[in-house]
Amino acid sequence: MSTVSQTHTAVPATSVKGAARAGVMARPGAEAVQEKGWWRAHKWLLLRRASQLGILALFLLGPWFGLWIVKGNLSSSLTLGVLPLTDPYLLLQSVAAGQWPYKEAVLGAGIVAAFYLLFGGRLFCSWVCPVNLVTDAAAWLRRRLGIKGGKVPSEYTRYWLLGLMLAASALTGSLAWEWVNPVSMLHRGLIFGFGLSWGIVLGVFVYDLLLASRGWCGHVCPVGAFYGVLNKTALIRVTADKRAECNDCMDCFAVCPEPQVIRPALKAVAQDHPLILDQDCTSCGRCIDVCSKDVFRLTTRFDRSES
Amino acid sequence: MSTQKNTRPSADGKSGQARRRFLKEMAGAAGGACMLALGVGLYGTEASARPASAIRPPGALPEPEFLAACVRCGLCVRDCPFDTLKLSELGDNVATGTPYFEGRKVPCEMCEDIPCVKACPTGALDRELTDIGKARMGLAVLIDQETCLNFLGLRCDVCYRVCPVIDKAITLELVHNPRSDRHAMLLPTVHSDACTGCGKCEHSCVLPEAAIKVLPYALAQGKAAEHYRKGWVEKEAAGGSLIGEQQQLPMRGLEDRKYGDTRVAPGYVPPSAEPSRPAGIDSGWKP
């Protein structure tokens, strides 16, 4: 408690808290850029963009340059002619709709599910999913324009949708979520051609920008909810092991796509250790970037050390 | 123990409040999700209609099963060596992301190894199909007899000649041309027992709008009731009529003909005694 009150004076004016006091617009992360330099203050963001664009590039090498490393799209793909990968949630909908797929698809879904179950399901959301680029852009613009308000749906909406889409698949006999799924529409659109699908992607952008802060990925998307369920046992986790250094600038809360996950670890609410174990955490590492005090770092779920 | 007892009522109140808030949020989430799910379900039902010109790849399951099995990955599209298949885009009016082709644009070349079926990881394209001749993507129908050149008595024959199953899926049937009265018409005739629905005939029809089109089976074919029997088939199978030989009644005015031959050439005079009367309302016939 005493450390917190002492550091109050040290809150920089560009941070969320400092700006709120001064009555100006916050620039979360500006302090970190000053302290650590631009590259270190964007390290995980740049790595994440490289991962997202790199995976997309692997899919595009074939149709653009005739270099067929990966065929297909995120729904189902074949790498180097041997490795099948299939979206397990998609396959669950297919099974719910009454179709038992061939072993390639089952094997592919098994490999994907095993990978994410081991390393962390929501790594998909922040390191692979192309819609993350869209919603991150919307969140950034929302911060820069200082757009407030809107109606954010409950964060449980996605879990209800996760179940209801399986029920709808069973009732209609088709892959229910695929009629609107912006994740597959964007990825397929980039590789096979958009048609009017860009309208759905634009809809997600506008929704996150004007109606609900971090609304799509954090509250609605049932694909993210599915990977959230796989995220319960994630090996890769963020820890706030230097939480004693925290100056309460609130920048991490401002950039975090799932801000509710930080508090238990950073402020020791209902837990002692500084590890963020909440299944909603996507391990995007943006909190690590924007913290000028280097409070956070990526580690494994077994590392409960605090320094 | 005692401190626990003291804090209990307030904790109860707090947890009760939290529970109420949680239940309220859950109800809101469930309601919102239900609305969205209902909307998506209805939209999906609406959008699963497919234009007749959109043909599924060979081996595709019947449409309802296909929509449940196809994960929209596009691997069949990638392995199609002729770029026939494409994934539907939103606005094509075919379930978004599912593969199809249009015979008039690029027909199926009927590869013998059927790479699209081999590529499908889910079984939306059924691997039971190993002989491309057994594919039933649709059925060609000579839909416009008013513009088809062969029906006008000309010898176009293009659909017949490009058919990969020539003389089985499309035959030319010789018919008398009543217009010239001295020529034959060779009418392209599709046979459903051999047509694969590849779309070559539709693709190559020389008219600005094809007179022969590949249609989904539901549009192209009628269906006989299950209890219908063809008498002549049954008779042949049984080696004779099932209801005994029929009385053959004489046909007045055609007594010199074979039974059933009712053709009348111009100037034919029937051998019967009665002179023919004029027909119609002025025939003078009275009961």
Image (cartoon, coloured by chain):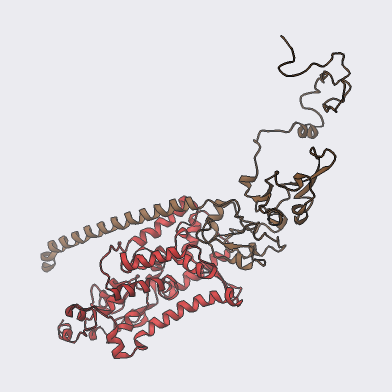
**Chain corresponding to brown in the figure:** B
Q: Is residue B191 above or below residue A304?
A: above
Q: Is B264 above or below relative to B132?
A: above
Quadrant where the C terminus of chain A sits is: bottom left
State the image coordinates of residue A292 (x, y, percent, origin top left): 28, 86
Judged left or right of residue A6, residue A147 is right
Toward the front, the furthest residue is B282
Camera sees residue B170: yes
* Nearest the eye: A218 or B152: B152
Q: Position of residue B198 (x, y in %)?
A: 68, 56
Q: Is residue A261 visible?
A: no
Q: Residue at x 57, y 52 (%)?
A: B51
Q: What residue do we see at 18% from left, 78% from top?
A: A23
Q: Nearer the viewer, residue A201 or B70?
A: A201
Judge from the rendering whether residue B34 lies leftward or rightward of residue B90; answer left or right.
left
Residue B243 position (above or below residue B49): above
Name the quarter where the N terminus of chain A is drawn.
Answer: bottom left
x%, y% of residue A246? 23, 84
Above or below: residue B255 compared with residue B286:
below
Q: Which chain is red?
A: A
Count the labels in the image.
0
Question: Where in the figure is residue B152, as x and y percent of width and height?
Answer: 76, 45
Q: Residue at the spot x=14%, y=67% of the render?
A: B4
Q: Nearer the viewer, residue B282 or A60?
A: B282
Q: Quadrant of residue A255?
A: bottom left
Judge left or right: residue A10 versus residue B172.
Answer: left
